[in-house]
Amino acid sequence: MTVQQSAPVPSATPTATKRAIAAATVGNALEWFDLALYALLASYIGRTFFPSDDAGVQLVQTYAVFGITYLIRPVGGLVLGAYADRHGRKKALMLSIRLMVAGTLLMAFMPGYATLGIAAPLGIVLARLLQGFAAAGEFGAATSFLVEQNAGRKGFLGSFQFASQGLSTLMAAGFAAGLTAVLSDGQMTSWGWRVPFVFGLLIGPVGYFVRRYVEESPAMAETPGVRSPVRAVFRDHWGGLLVAGGVLIVSTALNFMLQYLPTFGIKELGLDDSLAYVALFVTGAILTFGTPVVGLLADRYGRVRIMLPSALLIGAAAVPLFVWLTASPSFLTLMLCMTVLGLLKAAYFGALPSVMSDVFSARARATGLSFSYNTTVAVFGGFTPTIAAALVTATGSQVSPAYYLLAVAVLSVGALVAGARRHGIR
């Protein structure tokens, strides 16, 4: 069904809108920065907390923790999403950043397996659970907060949700490239991988301060509340959950595939560590600065007109790009492949937050967005690096991760078509 609003919601003032963008972007960038670091520095984290004689098994174990802790995200999405719908986007955003800082603190200072034994990997699991729970509520609250500032510019405003994730990739890749360039492998394993997590702790208070002094979303004051946002979502918006989750599948799988590719280049293709991370840095820059441009174009020309061709091209390009990368393994090839995928991803997910938000009413929006997003990420995102590494190990084919990307692109195309037909998304 198409979601109907009971009355037009007034727009925030230009000043309030700018502050909202700053609050969402700074906080999002911090939270996704910490999450991206784990994927990028997985090989060093694995040596610290998951001792094994087989480097491949060690990497799969490390990525498995990366994926397992995503299972908490649907729960976190429901809890923090409902909190945002009941008590306001602002309070939820302040809570999520506090939780993320707690998880980052554990990641930064948890002693390794050699010191604590089995307690060390368990501590990392706890840290990842805290980070996953925090990020679960972040997406729904921040996306709702952004798109509700101005209904006429929701494509552009919502794009900052994913632009901030691009910024986090940019920062994480910059740290990874810089550290691996100046530190030895032993230094990276011993202490170097912890440096960016400490940096995350330093900027955490900045994000909290910015969020504390923004105005609440106009929609929270203008629309009637519901007693149970969770019940409202599953009673009135089950179709919206399917559409919102479906259109997200290819975006989240590609996001984690891009984070996996530097490790793939290092482990499978023998590329230099720092150069592999430079390729991701370039991709992060594309996602950071290209996504808002796509949001602007989507407001003017229509979201489906941009997203549908992008999803089709992602599916069509996946296998040829992996074939090219494995046939000609070099820094230039890796960077070009990741640049192409980064451009396609920016084109697809620039308008994605506003599309997802349109299938939910205002007072159930944060809950619906949080649950659909985090369920999809748990199934198709968090385990993408694990699936990619396992596919290569099981099949012996370095191209095999591309077929997974092709499959999820087909699913998202179907969901996008359904959203256009059943929910009137344009």
Image (tube, helix red, strand yellow):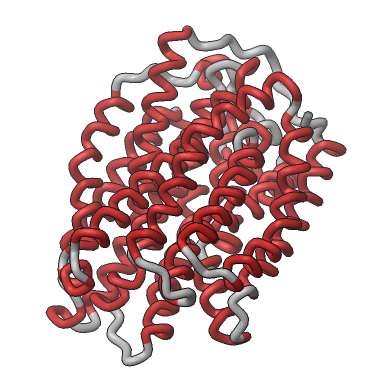
Can you name the residue that lies furthest to the bottom here? Answer: 53
Q: Give the camera-side residue of 1 and 53.
A: 53
Percent of width and height locating residue 274: 33, 60
Tell me where residue 31 sits by quadrant.
Answer: top left
Q: Is residue 253 left or right of residue 41?
A: right
Q: Residue at x 55, y 53 (%)?
A: 336
Percent of width and height locating residue 89: 45, 29
Q: Can see residue 135? A: yes
User: Looking at the image, is 216 positioned above or below residue 32?
Assistant: above
Q: Residue at x 47, y 8 (%)?
A: 14
Q: Can see residue 71? A: no
Q: Tally the numbered discs.
A: 0
Q: Give the camera-side residue of 364 and 103.
A: 103
Q: Residue at x 36, y 52 (%)?
A: 173
Percent of width and height locating residue 382: 51, 62
**Quadrant of the drawing holding the N terminus:** top right
Q: Is residue 169 left or right of residue 234?
A: left
User: Looking at the image, is 38 positioned above or below residue 140?
Assistant: below
Q: Residue at x 43, y 24 (%)?
A: 21
